[in-house]
């Protein structure tokens, strides 16, 4: 059964594309009508998502102005909340790790309530050990509970990656910090960051406040907004567009909390983490899998709480333009490998009889539709819409519908570009303070670069998603391992 679930998303996506090509040849009128209706659907969806994006952006800016530490004063027991922060590290340079710790140092939260773990990999060698030792030397005076863990290489049942390193680090932190300090597990929140994640000053106060006011604090993940802007001025145009697109998608998801799951840097209760057995060590997409682990373990009694408060990370950038393109593709393919959650979730639904049927139907549709849209929508809109004219029958090519199809689709897409314009404006507003050498004319280019969005949606959206789904279909040696995105400042 699990192999059937592996094949399902890829077969669905490839089947859709095959049918569009085949019917464009055999039934061009049908496909022409479908394309027009699909473009109208895309227009309405773009407008709908643009409204959510603007609402989330406005709320995030409001939350950035709130003194969350002061708001915690209404809770008599807020100082009992400890934050376990895990930063997995592979081969990131010293400057990246240092900047992340500098941001932690500037945060407005009692440092004795922060339990910090820099989790290095044994396979990273002496370089990683030297960086970790330097970080500990520089920052241990500010953080009384800072430890270094070293994840052994080649452990049975693991793949080298973030999930296995996090699990090792969390178990070490449990023994060396949480248990040693006799902190109740229900008073510990785990923030799992990428090595380049930089927190804003009120992050831990905001997180603690949402934890203390959540409907089910011990049955919730807590998701900040990921801003990929640390090195945004040095990144090429394509990298900037993809970085902002990822940010905007997560912002739109925050404004629809019923669909929100965990992504990249996020937080969760330590008690729940120990009860589910930590992160799975043989997968790539641990940041989203942990949500589904909790959802299945607690029989559907799990949710993600949006924080509407940001953390910042690096945009994907390399020393050369072509290496950046390759890294962008690999990063998008790794994110698209989250499709491995579909067979895990569907098989879990099949086995778990306690989760409500309507919840199973809702999430099954959401996750399958999401990955199917990722792999096919951009190709349908920007590439396959012309097929009825190119390969359709002679009768169709002489019809009024054939003559008007390009104009109809073009006009619909022009209206849909309102969403792109909105994204372009918001991207300028999210830029950090400009460094030396950046002039006003550069901002005009940052607006114009959004004309590349259709290209990025295909080359760094649909195609890597299709590859990921195809690899899942084939299984075995075709399955993806974990790829660490190189950091370049």
Image: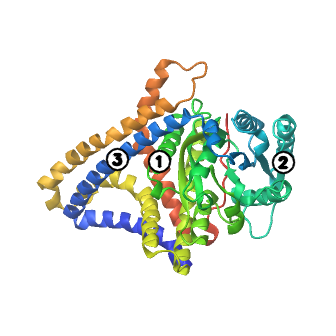
Tell me if I can see residue 154 in this picture. yes
- The residue lying at 50 percent from left, 35 percent from top is 62
- The residue lying at 72 percent from left, 64 percent from top is 274
User: CB of mark 3 within 8 Å of CB of mark 1?
Assistant: no
The residue that label 1 is drawn on is 249
Q: Classify mark 1: helix, strand or loop.
A: helix
Sequence-earlier tag: 3 or 1: 3
The residue lying toward the viewer, choosing from 195 and 409, is: 195
- The residue lying at 58 percent from left, 48 percent from top is 210
Structural distance between the alpha carbons of marks 2 and 1:
34 Å
User: CB of mark 2 within 8 Å of CB of mark 1?
Assistant: no
User: CB of mark 2 within 8 Å of CB of mark 3?
Assistant: no
Q: Classify mark 3: helix, strand or loop.
A: helix
Tell me where residue 204 sits by quadrant: top right
Q: Is residue 380 above or below residue 276?
A: above
Tell me where residue 172 sits by quadrant: bottom right
The residue that label 2 is drawn on is 147
The residue lying toward the viewer, choosing from 233 and 299, is: 299
Sequence-earlier tag: 2 or 3: 3
Tell me if I can see residue 83 in this picture. no
The residue that label 3 is drawn on is 46
Structural distance between the alpha carbons of marks 2 and 3:
46 Å
Sequence-earlier tag: 2 or 1: 2
Mark 1 crowd level (few <14, some 14–19, many ≥20, 10 Å Cα): some
Q: Position of residue 307 (x, y in %)?
A: 55, 46
Q: In front of the other: label 2 or label 1? A: 2
Position of residue 457 in the picture relative to residue 179 (left or right) = left
Structural distance between the alpha carbons of marks 3 and 1:
12 Å
The residue lying toward the viewer, choosing from 165 and 235, is: 165
Q: Position of residue 312 (x, y in %)?
A: 61, 39
Q: Is residue 385 above or below residue 418?
A: below
Q: Classify mark 2: helix, strand or loop.
A: strand
């Amino acid at each position: 059964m699990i192999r059937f679930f592996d094949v399902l998303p890829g077969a669905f996506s490839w089947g859709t594309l095959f049918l569009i090509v085949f019917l464009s040849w055999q039934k061009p009128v049908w496909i022409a009508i479908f394309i027009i209706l699909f473009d109208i659907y895309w227009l309405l969806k773009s407008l709908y998502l643009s409204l959510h994006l603007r609402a989330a952006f406005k709320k995030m800016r409001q939350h950035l102005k709130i003194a969350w530490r002061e708001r915690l004063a209404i809770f008599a027991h807020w100082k009992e909340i400890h934050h376990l922060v895990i930063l997995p590290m592979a081969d990131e340079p010293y400057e990246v790790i240092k900047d992340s710790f500098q941001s932690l140092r500037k945060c407005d939260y009692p440092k004795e309530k922060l339990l910090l773990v820099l989790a290095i990999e044994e396979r990273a060698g002496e370089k990683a050990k030297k960086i970790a030792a330097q970080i500990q030397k520089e920052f241990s005076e500010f953080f009384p509970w800072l430890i270094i863990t070293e994840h052994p290489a080649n452990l049975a049942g693991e793949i080298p990656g973030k999930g296995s390193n996090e699990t090792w680090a969390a178990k070490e932190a449990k023994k060396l910090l949480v248990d040693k300090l006799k902190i109740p597990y229900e008073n510990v929140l785990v923030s799992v960051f990428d090595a380049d994640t930089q927190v804003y000053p009120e992050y831990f106060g905001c997180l603690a406040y949402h934890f203390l006011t959540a409907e089910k604090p011990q049955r919730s993940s807590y998701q900040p907004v990921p801003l990929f802007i640390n090195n945004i001025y040095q990144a090429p145009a394509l990298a900037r567009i993809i970085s902002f697109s990822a940010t905007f998608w997560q912002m739109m998801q925050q404004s629809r909390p019923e669909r929100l799951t965990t992504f990249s840097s996020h937080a969760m209760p330590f008690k729940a983490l120990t009860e589910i057995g930590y992160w799975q060590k043989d997968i790539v997409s641990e940041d989203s899998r942990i949500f589904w682990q909790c959802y299945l373990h607690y029989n559907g009694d799990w949710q993600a709480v949006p924080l509407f408060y940001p953390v910042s990370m690096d945009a994907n950038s390399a020393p050369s333009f072509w290496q950046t393109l390759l890294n962008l593709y690999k990063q998008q393919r790794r994110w698209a490998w989250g499709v491995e959650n579909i067979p895990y979730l569907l098989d879990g639904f099949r086995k778990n009889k306690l989760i409500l049927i309507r919840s199973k139907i809702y999430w099954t549709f959401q996750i399958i539709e999401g990955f199917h849209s990722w792999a096919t929508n951009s190709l349908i809109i920007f590439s396959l819409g012309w097929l009825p004219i190119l390969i359709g029958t002679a009768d169709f090519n002489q019809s009024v519908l054939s003559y008007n199809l390009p104009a109809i689709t073009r006009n619909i897409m022009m209206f849909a570009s309102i969403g792109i314009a909105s994204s372009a404006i918001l991207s300028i507003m999210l830029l950090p303070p400009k460094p030396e050498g950046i002039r006003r004319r550069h901002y005009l280019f940052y607006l114009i670069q959004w004309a590349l969005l259709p290209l990025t949606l295909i080359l760094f959206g649909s195609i890597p998603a299709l590859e990921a789904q195809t690899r899942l279909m084939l299984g075995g040696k075709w399955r993806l391992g974990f790829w660490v995105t190189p950091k370049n400042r």
